[in-house]
């Protein structure tokens, strides 16, 4: 039986110390390979922006609106990604970029065909992003447009930033101005939170 074999204390110490020393040195000498290093996720995922059109206009503008919504999401993601974010890295003299990814409408529709809020939040969380942008444009007439924008925490679902903005005109230029303004608002609000 193993319990009956007595190892003298001196011999036991000599065996244990080299093993512990080698184990400790191996941990310091061999850094984890690059593929084993955790890759930080993006800071924010821009979810597809939706449109609620209650204008009652007789002309079908669904194709133009689909293009504008996609362009708005793409431009918002690019603008936010290009803006430096104040954080721990900026204290060291480096400006860390705000990591942004965009989720396509097709990807979200496949994953959440019922547009359930819990499913959408789960898909946002699956990207690794800690925040998600959710936006709805409401067109009440040819001239009056509203944007309801939220940045939510992907884990808790809490709203971190909320903006309700108005813009005039249903054309490419007005949508682009709105996107630029919204990007500045989100970036400024995010800087103050960190």
Image: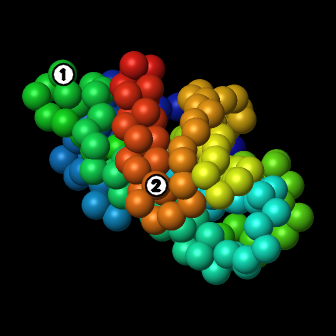
Image depth: mark 2 or mark 1 in front: 2
User: What secondary structure is marked by label 2?
Assistant: helix
Residue at mark 2: 174
User: What secondary structure is marked by label 1?
Assistant: helix
First in residue order: circle 2 vs circle 1: 1
Q: Is residue 175 above or below residue 10?
A: below
Viewer-side residue, 58 vs 63:
58
Q: Using the image, tell me which numbered label, if any, was put on residue 127.
A: none
Q: Tell me the quadrant of the picture where the N terminus can be found.
A: top right
Q: For the point 77% across and 58% down, which residue is it? A: 55
Image quadrant in which you'd find residue 156: top right
Q: For the point 20% across and 28% down, which residue is it? A: 90
Q: Tell me the quadrant of the picture where the C terminus can be found.
A: top left
Does residue 155 appear anywhere in the picture? Answer: yes
Q: For the point 62% across and 33% down, which residue is it? A: 164
Which x, y percent locates residue 84? 25, 39
Viewer-side residue, 75 vs 88:
75
Q: CA distance from mark 2 to mark 1?
A: 37 Å
Residue at mark 1: 91
Q: Is residue 71 above or below residue 12?
A: below
Q: For the point 57% across and 60% down, which residue is it? A: 170
Q: Residue furthest left?
A: 93
């Amino acid at each position: 039986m193993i319990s009956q074999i007595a190892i003298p204390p001196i011999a036991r110490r000599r065996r244990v110390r080299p093993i512990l020393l080698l184990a400790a040195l191996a941990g310091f000498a061999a850094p984890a390979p690059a593929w084993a290093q955790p890759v930080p996720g993006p800071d924010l995922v821009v979810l597809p922006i939706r449109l609620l059109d209650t204008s009652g206009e007789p002309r079908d503008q669904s194709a133009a609106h689909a293009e504008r919504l996609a362009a708005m999401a793409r431009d918002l993601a690019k603008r936010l990604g290009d803006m430096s974010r104040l954080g721990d890295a900026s204290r060291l003299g480096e400006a860390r970029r705000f990591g942004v990814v965009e989720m396509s409408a097709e990807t979200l529709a496949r994953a959440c065909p019922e547009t359930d809020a819990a499913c959408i939040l789960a898909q946002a969380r699956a990207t690794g992003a800690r925040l998600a942008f959710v936006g709805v444009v409401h067109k009440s007439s040819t001239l009056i447009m509203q944007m309801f924008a939220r940045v939510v925490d992907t884990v808790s679902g809490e709203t971190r930033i909320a903006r309700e903005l108005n813009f005039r005109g249903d054309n490419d230029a007005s949508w682009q101005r709105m996107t630029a303004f919204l990007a500045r608002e989100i970036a400024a609000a995010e800087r103050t939170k960190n």
